[in-house]
Amino acid sequence: MRQLYIGGSWTASASGEPIEVVNPATEEIIDRVPAGSPDDVETAVRAARQAFPAWSETAAAERGKILGEAAELLRQRSDEIAKTIATDMGSPLGFALKVQALMPATVLSSYAQLAESHPRESRVGNSLVVKEPIGVVAAITPWNYPLHQIVCKVGPALAAGCTVVLKPSEIAPLAAYALAEIFHEVGLPPGAFNLVSGRGPVVGEAMAAHPEVDMVSFTGSTAAGRRVASLAAESVKRVALELGGKSANIILPDADLATAVKVGVANCFVNAGQTCSAWTRMIVHRDQYDAAVRLAVEATGKYTVGDPFDESTRIGPLVSAVQRDRVIRYINRGQEEGARLVAGGTDRPHERGYYVEPTVFAGVEPGMAIEQEEIFGPVLSMIPYTSEDMAVQIANGTRYGLAGAVWAGTEEHAVAVARRLRTGQVAINGGKFNPRAPFGGYKQSGVGRELGEHGLEEYLEIKSLQL
Ligand code: NAD
């Protein structure tokens, strides 16, 4: 069994209990990590608290240098990390390398730079306004982009001068261990970063409730985020939440339909649909609807489902049996509600492994469960509209607001519609993901922003000195 990383050393968990890590493609146990306990959280928070004064006062250039070295080691170990994530989470290897392993290296190196370049002081009249690290940060992360989501918190927190206790997802925890090894190797001071693996209701809740934690940054489901926020409220700590989504892809009549549908399908199915910002609702004008459905079905036929290590695979298994069963339930529910299954369905593509067919529903109406709820699998809902106002209303008609897309004949037209969307990110005519642009949710998709300067600001307190 692996160990916890606390105060700069690898230590056994007080619980002595393991959590088994399963390869979702083979259903075999591949590793064991400690099921951390509240006592482990206590030890880790104490270590982070002790390390805070020195790390927060370390020169920004020095903090940046250490983070830059860590980013470089992440890059050097990217092949191995990609294999780890392909194995414990099921991402196809090519995607695992490019996105799951290398994007965190890019994000960490951007925070290495921002540690020094982000301005910490400004003047307002007779006041000097200074920004200071908030203190001890509890970071709780999910399994779908297991390393990226960790780095989106740990990178800015350490760059700001905070110290961190991390609880990675118990379902895909292995990349977090590589990061801890890297921080150790580059000489991050003991206690600045601590890793306590374990279950949400035990370790996560102890972290969120701990009075010596100044801020909790959570990524995961809206239900667990709500619980974390309510526990954190007892000690009035800052809370950042990155939660679920049901993002809309609006295709306007003057757009290039074939491209918009093709890219839209790809975005919905990326990482087997286990992407919080996936465009899971394709909103198409009634006049183009049948053509769009045909194009979507055709595109879906090209998505080979299989072993993450096979080069032809575009969709790997879902992360767990629980996740697979949940997605299957939604596919059944969509049919019961009267939506038309035009691709995929509930058949198992392979006997072993938690695989699901990429699935497309036509005839989806606003208000259906498959239109409102986050499925977190490769399931696309296609919804017709008859006016631009109606398209915007459908797009804004869920409790979520994380991402989305607008396709139009001109950038101006797409931007005008995007401005009306109550959501944190919008891709204009397929605009590429930008790892330095703020990412986060409106409504129940979350509170706060990650990435870039906005992500760093989350970890800073503000003090005014009247001169
Ligand atoms: P989850 O909420 O089950 O778990 C996320 C993390 O929270 C895990 O580490 C888990 O152990 C912990 N946790 C669970 N219950 C907890 C509790 N009561 N107290 C404290 N911690 C608890 O989510 P998941 O299944 O791992 O991930 C999928 C969800 O994450 C989806 O809803 C997805 O949309 C969301 N997500 C959001 C973003 C974003 O940036 N907005 C990114 C990725 C995933």
Image (cartoon, rainbow, N blue to C red):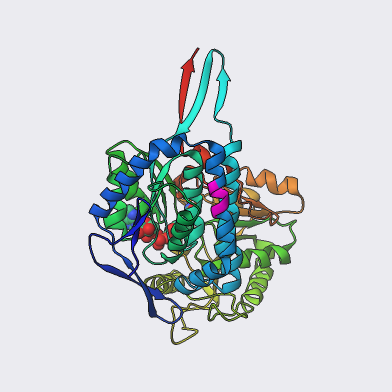
Q: Give the x, y percent position of residue 130.
A: 50, 26
Q: Is residue 86 above or below residue 63?
A: below
Q: Is residue 447 visible?
A: yes
* Front-most of residues 247 and 40: 40
Q: Give the x, y percent position of residue 203.
A: 29, 55
* Front-most of residues 336 and 302: 302
The quarter of the picture showing ligand 1: bottom left
Residue appearing at x 56%, y 52% in the figure: 69
Q: Give the x, y percent position of residue 192.
A: 41, 46
Q: Which quadrant, please, contains the N terminus? A: bottom left
Which residue is at the far bottom?
A: 351
Magenta segment includes 422: no
Residue appearing at x 60%, y 43% in the figure: 113
Q: Specify the segment rendered in magenta.
A: 66-70
Q: Is residue 423 visible?
A: no
Q: Give the x, y percent position of residue 199.
A: 31, 61
Magenta: main secondary structure: helix
* Front-most of residues 369 and 113: 113
